[in-house]
Image: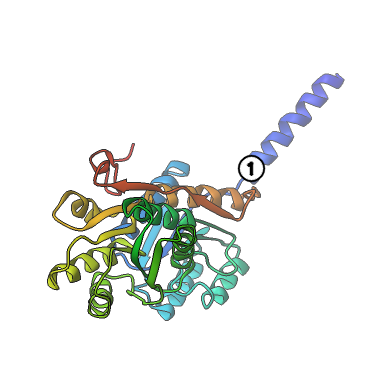
Amino acid sequence: MLKRVLLAGAALALATSVASAKDLKAVGITLGSLGNPFFVTLAKGAEAKAKEINPAVRVTAVSADYDLNKQFTQIDNFIASGVDLILLNAVDPKAIEPAVKKAQAAGIVVMAVDVAASGADATVQTNNVQAGEIACQYIVDKLGGKGDVIIQNGPQVSAVIDRVNGCKAVFEKAPGIKVLSSDQDGKGSREGGLNVMQGHLTRFPKIDAVFAINDPQAIGTDLAAKQLNRTGIVITSVDGAPDIEAALKGNTMVEASASQDPYAMAQQAVEVGYGIMNGKKPEQPMVLMPSTLVTRDNVKDYKGWSAPRS
């Protein structure tokens, strides 16, 4: 009799725990720009993971277009529509905090993706320090530890700051490497990289290598060098974007890019966020995904952002 009572109690406890598990019914995603294939892939990864958890889930992905006020409005709309989880690629990681707190007050879990956001429940991003390290170690090795280099900076979000810090740490260990400039903002864009590099090429008669904080800036840097008939410059960057795959296979001075995996990043963010919804907090609030270096030698084997996913 006692055994039957214990078994019944255990079954009731199990049923109660199953019943109390929160369903993932709706996910809102606000991203820097859906004109960027990185964010398009990120949205696809999030939707795939959310539908794996609940095939009937409603997923809404919107483009903030790097407009803070627009992102505030988007988060308000997510709150009004009753989403369970928000994936946030913050336009301004600090200024977005009131919107994060407002969503959390409404019982919504907020996951930061790609860049940190103040107050978010957790963050999933590339290990950007490591990405900067491997991209700049390639330069050191290629130059035999000696040369004049540029660190082409970008918008001061956590991802960019970390990449530059990783790069600087590597260059500091190579006494033969002279950093000519590290504070110019290439705006994260091809045009910005082009403009900054034109200024550097005019200012410095000898540049052996450039580390650009992302692939669009690297492509702009290559275009500027070609326009001014400068050759023999080693260019590396971070992203592993489709454009850089073409650049690594083509007639450019781009030689390497530390890759990110936005699809896997988003899947991890949804998984962690769903766990938090159900009381399972990650061991670390910052989940870092490793970067691998894509080069001219291994690009043929690289499974890029647009590769089919199982």
Viewer-closest of 75 and 302: 302
Neighbour tally class for label 1: few under 14, some 14-19, many 20 plus, Cα within 10 Å: few
* Residue drawn at x 41%, y 61% as measured from the top left: 176
* Residue drawn at x 43%, y 58% as measured from the top left: 132
Viewer-closest of 157 and 77: 157
Examine the rendering and report whether any part of residue 153 can be seen: no
Q: Is residue 308 above or below residue 157?
A: above
Q: Position of residue 61 (x, y in %)?
A: 37, 61
Q: Assign a secondary structure to mark 1.
A: helix
* Residue drawn at x 87%, y 21% as measured from the top left: 2
Q: Position of residue 22 (x, y in %)?
A: 59, 49
Q: Is residue 258 above or below residue 219?
A: above
Residue type at mark 1 is Ala
How many numbered callouts?
A: 1
Which residue is labeled 1 in the image? 19
Q: Residue furthest right?
A: 2
Q: Is residue 273 left or right of residue 303?
A: right
Q: Position of residue 234 (x, y in %)?
A: 27, 58
Examine the rendering and report whether any part of residue 219 can be seen: yes
Say which quarter of the image contains residue 300.
top left
Name the quarter where the C terminus is drawn.
Answer: top left
Say which quarter of the image contains residue 152.
bottom left
> What colouring does the structure picture have?
rainbow
Q: Is residue 145 above or below residue 230?
A: above
Q: Is residue 138 left or right of residue 85?
A: left
Name the quarter where the N terminus is drawn.
Answer: top right
Q: Position of residue 50 (x, y in %)?
A: 44, 48
Say which quarter of the image contains residue 216.
bottom left
Viewer-closest of 208 and 107: 208
